[in-house]
Amino acid sequence: MEAHAIPTTTVGAAGRDQRPSLSRLTKVELRKALDTRAGFWLQLAVLGLTVITVMITAAAGHTDDKTFRHMLANALIPASVLLPVIGILLVSSEWSQRTALVSFSLVPARPRLIAAKALAGIVIGLAAFVVAIVFAALGTAVASPNIHDVWSLPIGLVGQDLVFVTTSMLIGIAFGAAILASAPAIVIFFALPTAIGALGSIHSIEGTVEWLNSQPSLETVMSGHEWAQSLVMFVLWIALPLAIGLWRITRRDLAA
């Protein structure tokens, strides 16, 4: 991983400490997410797989799958799978690449740096969302399915798709913060939903499991009950691990 110049605290004319702004720290984290080999290739993979998914849907999908709504839902799948890995690496690589000592020495307020990483993750998620919209629109235009409401996309569904992508990224950041080791965090991130899904096959606890792993829908506008399930999932998969991560990061010996 390449070294990056993180803005340090300076002393102003009045003798007061001037901390780097959160926006400046976010820009640094965005550059770090792109400059590393893993980050670069993962983001390139998101772009490539998004294009391939749209091309396959346009060429081989059923007529009903070639609407803008379905095309966009398919285009967002690669981002939902790979962006969390970028989020994990954005946090955990500070320890796996042993840059935490430098990063947190230059920016002593550790929660501010984690906030910058979260904001950088949201920006990356927004960029992936825009890319998916562009290629989904192109795919729909090329496929030109002769069906009613081919371009119909309810505003509520747009919001759900956006929440789906950004929260997927935040889940990765939260897991990376809680575990602080890249490989275990990635394994747990992919294994845990599978384990929870297996539990959902048990009829007696099926209703409970739905509250543990219910992300926003990509194709249908959600009801209030479904949003409540998603909010519970956000607390369990984002807020809780992020709180654990902040507790560990603010107390961890940087030399460890």
Image: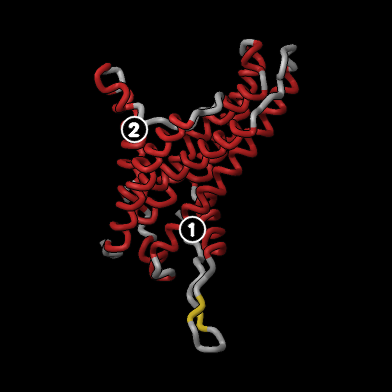
Mark 2 → mark 1, Cα distance in angstroms: 27 Å
Mark nearer the viewer, 2 or 1: 2
Residue at 41 percent of width and 42 percent of height: 171
The front one of 39 and 27 is: 27
Residue at 49 percent of width and 39 percent of height: 83
Of the 4 image quadrants, the one containing the C terminus is bottom left
Q: Which color mode does the image show?
A: secondary structure
Is 251 above or below relative to 173? below
The front one of 146 and 175 is: 146
Q: Which residue is mark 2?
A: 212
The 10 Å Cα crowd at callout 1, few under 14, some 14 to 19, many 20 or more, is: many
The 10 Å Cα crowd at callout 2, few under 14, some 14 to 19, many 20 or more, is: many
Residue at 36 percent of width and 65 percent of height: 101
Q: Amino acid at mark 2?
A: Leu
**Residue 198 visible somewhere in the drawing:** no
**Residue 12 visible somewhere in the drawing:** yes
Q: Which residue is mark 1?
A: 116
Q: Earlier in the sequence, mark 2 or mark 1?
A: 1
Residue at 71 percent of width and 19 percent of height: 149
Q: Amino acid at mark 1?
A: Ala
**Which disc number belongs to residue 51?**
none
Residue 56 in percent (x, y) is at 61, 18
Is 62 above or below relative to 153? above
Is 240 above or below relative to 61? below
Indicate the secondary structure of the residue bearing disc 2: loop
The front one of 38 and 139 is: 139
